[in-house]
Amino acid sequence: MLTLNAVTYLTKIFIKCLILQHFPDASKIAHVLMFPKPNQSRKLPGSYRPISLLSNICKLYEKILLKRLNDHCYSNNIIPDEQFGFRDKHSCTHQLLRVANKIVEGFNIKHYTGGVFLDVIGNIQAGTPQGSSLIPTLYNIFNSDFPRNDKVLNCLFADDSAILTQGSNIGFIIKTLQSQLECIEYWCTKWRVAIHTEKTKAILFRKGHSSKVLKTFSFMENLPWENQVKYLGLILDSKLSFRQHAK
């Protein structure tokens, strides 16, 4: 429990930092712990997740900045509605329901739903250490100009991204998704966002069966169609039966 004098001094320091738009150099020093990612080679630097242990005073200051940053984003509608990651009254479950409802809506009117589920390599640290409370909001701001299309539903949860489109014609779906993928590829090149193409999946949700061979997408490299994808921990198959996920 801090004494009244300590709270007063900290308040004065934080107010001065805000006025001067300054973040003390001493507060930028962190003790970094490296945690290995599961099922990856420990010989590669990318196989570890760095977590920074920051000073308590630094964490307090970041909380103040985060409150002001979130208020500014809310007042100016900076974070797009399709972004469900790290936002009040939004959750992983809400985004999954949004995706599932869109697919079921297509089934009910006998439409196909095509989707591409993107795998981003790492996230954007925006100059802050991993473990900082500012990272989620700063990433959402960075990601706020993700390409939009009236014919495409963007489903974003932090750096887990999916795009969906619907129609009665498979050719229309392929053309629409390909156009959006080209915009995303340009966006990734512009902002130096890396996509793990081997883990990026395309899927066509539909009732019934078809022997028609679907045209592959061109997205950094050829992107084939799959019978199932994993999004936010949930396995989605082309019939939306959830049988594979329930195993």
Image: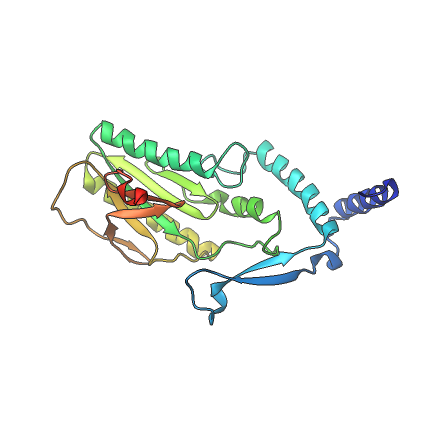
Left or right: 209, with 231 as reference point? left
Residue extending furthest toward the left = 211
Relative to 93, does residue 133 appear above or below in the rendering? below
Residue extending furthest toward the bottom = 43
| Residue 37 in sight from this viewpoint | yes
Q: Nearer the viewer, residue 41 or 187?
A: 41
Left or right: 59, with 136 as reference point? right
Residue extending furthest toward the top = 109
Report the number of discs.
Answer: 0
**Residue at (57, 47) in percent of width and height:** 138
Q: What sort of colour scheme is used for the picture?
A: rainbow
Residue extending furthest toward the right = 5
Q: Position of residue 141 (x, y in %)?
A: 54, 44
Q: Position of residue 42 (x, y in %)?
A: 47, 69
Left or right: 130, with 80 as reference point? right
Q: Nearer the viewer, residue 180 or 1?
A: 1
Location of the C terminus (image quadrant): top left
| Residue 175 in sight from this viewpoint | no
**Residue at (68, 55) in percent of width and height:** 54
Q: Position of residue 82 (x, y in %)?
A: 44, 37
Location of the N terminus (image quadrant): top right
Q: Nearer the viewer, residue 195 or 181?
A: 195
Quadrant in which residue 7 is drawn: top right
Q: Position of residue 152 (x, y in %)?
A: 34, 38
**Residue at (75, 50) in percent of width and height:** 57
Quadrant in which residue 95 is drawn: top left
Relative to 219, does residue 47 appear above or below in the rendering? below
**Residue at (61, 47) in percent of width and height:** 134
